[in-house]
Image (cartoon, helix red, strand yellow):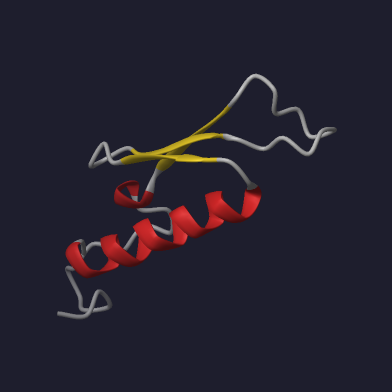
Amino acid sequence: MPADKVGDPPQPALPAWKAFVVQFARETDGSQPTFSGRVEHLSSGRRAQFNSEKELLTILARLLAELGHSSA
């Protein structure tokens, strides 16, 4: 059912089911090539480690794609 029908609540611009926490390792400060840590999806608790900017973005894209198929 489309969200623009009368009586349907508006869809939030920042839905909670797409919320993540990104925690950076102590060595990550922006001035060094080290870029590592972990990312966690708040609703499901799924988490993954990353060791580069590219890896972080790849993990986020994969999780968002998976969530898009299972959440509204």
Q: Position of residue 57 (x, y in %)?
A: 55, 56
Residue 23 pos. (x, y %):
52, 29
The quarter in which the N terminus is drawn is bottom left
Q: Could one spot residue 20 in this view of the protein?
A: yes
Quadrant hosting residue 10: bottom left
Residue located at (26% from left, 36% from top):
45
Instruction: Say left or right for 16 vs 22.
Output: left
Q: Position of residue 61 (x, y in %)?
A: 45, 62
Residue 67 located left or right of residue 20: left
Q: Is residue 62 left or right of residue 24?
A: left
Q: Residue at x 22, y 69 (%)?
A: 69
The quadrant the C terminus occupies is bottom left
Q: Residue at x 70, y 28 (%)?
A: 28
Q: Position of residue 2 (x, y in %)?
A: 21, 80
Q: Relative to 5, is 65 above or below?
A: above
- Farthest residue toward the right? 31
> Does 24 appear above or below 53?
above
